[in-house]
Image (cartoon, rainbow, N blue to C red):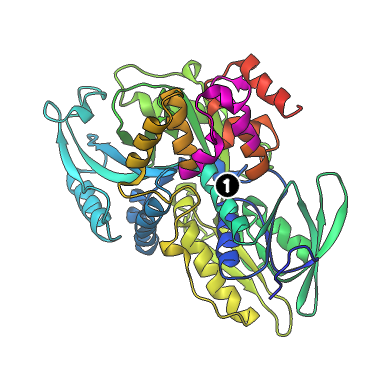
Amino acid sequence: MTNSLESSSVDLVVVGGGINGAGIARDAAGRGLSVLLVERGDLGNATSSASSKLIHGGLRYLEQYQFRLVRESLAEREVLLAAAGHLIWPLRFVLPLHRGLRPAWVLRTGLWLYDHIGGRDRLPPTRTLRRGRDPELDPLRAEFRRGFEYSDCWADDARLVVTNAVDARARGASVEVGTTFEAARREGREWQVRLASPGGGGRMVRARALVNAAGPWVEQILRGSGAPRRNAVRLVKGSHIVVPRVYSGEQAYTLQNRDGRVVFMIPYEKAFTLIGTTDVPFDGDPTELRADAEEIEYLCRSASDYLPTPISPGDLRWSYAGVRPLHDDGAQNASTITRDYVFDLDAPPAAAPMLSVFGGKLTTYRKLAEHALAQLLPVLGVRTGPWTRAATLPGGDFPPGGYEAFAHSMRLRHGGFPPTLIDRLCRAYGTIAERILGGAVDPRGLGEEIAPELFEAELQHLREREWARSADDVLWRRSKLGLRYDRAQADRVRAWFGG
């Protein structure tokens, strides 16, 4: 195997810097392979930063008999919670009983399965709620008298992508953001991969194998490499809205709708509520996405059916949309298309292999990477075993007591800083927050305050260590500070990047 990435030859070129590509690059680099991960935009700038921000089993998938997917997802929920306690943390979900929709016995049966089929160790079990006894029902309209409360996890999706890429680089991978895959051709047991850099220059890279983890663009990569297309991708658009916080408490809500779908209401960035998602078939350009008026109205109506005070499109602080590149299983309804993943391994005799990834979801990315390499490595004649299950992600190596003990100690050690700043840095970076703070004893040691509680030291870290190249990379992906800043404050961040 090649040890140096300074040459133009690597073991693996991974195309696509979303969660699946970053996860595969990390896993492969940790097994000793030389890896080049290329992403034409920003890491996680498409589907992987436009999710519902959940690490969950997918309660509604039980209705579709996707038991394997739910079991694997619930098991992964525990693994990821242990690996990155700063980016993933427990969240309790309230599922109100809605007259005329799923009856109590159906929900109770599904939640019993949800509690037991995935090996729940860290999270509390389901409990029954009654109005007047349990305050979690109080934010809802008076007609909702009963419900259930169950466990899942919240995640910072975009930072999870970046953190996997950081770990891949630490283990020897090369990560190139702003680098476009143009084409590839087989020459015997190697791929000749043509890449274009941000400045417009091109180069060729030789690779023993090619991984196509391009998400919505997976078929475009297949066309550009001349590989056969044996599976199809179905694009399903999901939109979310963010409004000023509409209820108190740290619980989320799972809201049933009369069309059979569910919509989540989730506490978001302390002062906001995140509401989503939609499921709309999509056949346009995935780079041109926004929540349209019909989707926004649907989400407002879904939440308002449960809230004493309705919300309207005029309440929106932000909206975003992404497309899920799902494996086309022939389902007619976009909501019932499987969220499971499928691999297409194209490995003709005596020729370099190509592995294409269809489908998948945020929760299962680590297991997807493990399964991808289990298919690919035997073709390459490489014998290495899985390693990521017990490994923490960068920033997740907390001392005894876990994240909460770490954050408490950080607030004590750095008393010269605003507690809100320390809390945000701990959540975003975990133990790596110490590197950003350095030896500073108060904010003056972090350089200029470019925008409220955003200092040069953090921006330099994001640019030099996390591939941030623009204000949007910082304000809407590596943080959500864009929700809090006005135009002038955001413009100062853009000016810092030279934009």
Q: Position of residue 274 (x, y in %)?
A: 43, 30
Left or right of 70: which side holds 427?
right
Q: Position of residue 406 (x, y in %)?
A: 37, 41
Q: Is residue 101 visible?
A: yes
Residue 434 included in the magenta stretch of the image: yes
Query: What residue would you read off at disc 1?
Result: 162
Total numbered labels: 1
Can you say which quadrant of the picture contains the C terminus?
A: top right
Image quarter for residue 20?
Answer: bottom right
Q: Secondary structure at mark 1?
A: helix
Q: Position of residue 366 (x, y in %)?
A: 48, 59
Question: What residue is drawn where x is 29% and y is 18%?
Answer: 308
Q: Which residues are magenta?
A: 431-460
Residue placed furthest toward the right: 201
Question: What residue is drawn where x is 47% and y is 17%?
Answer: 315
Residue 256 included in the magenta stretch of the image: no
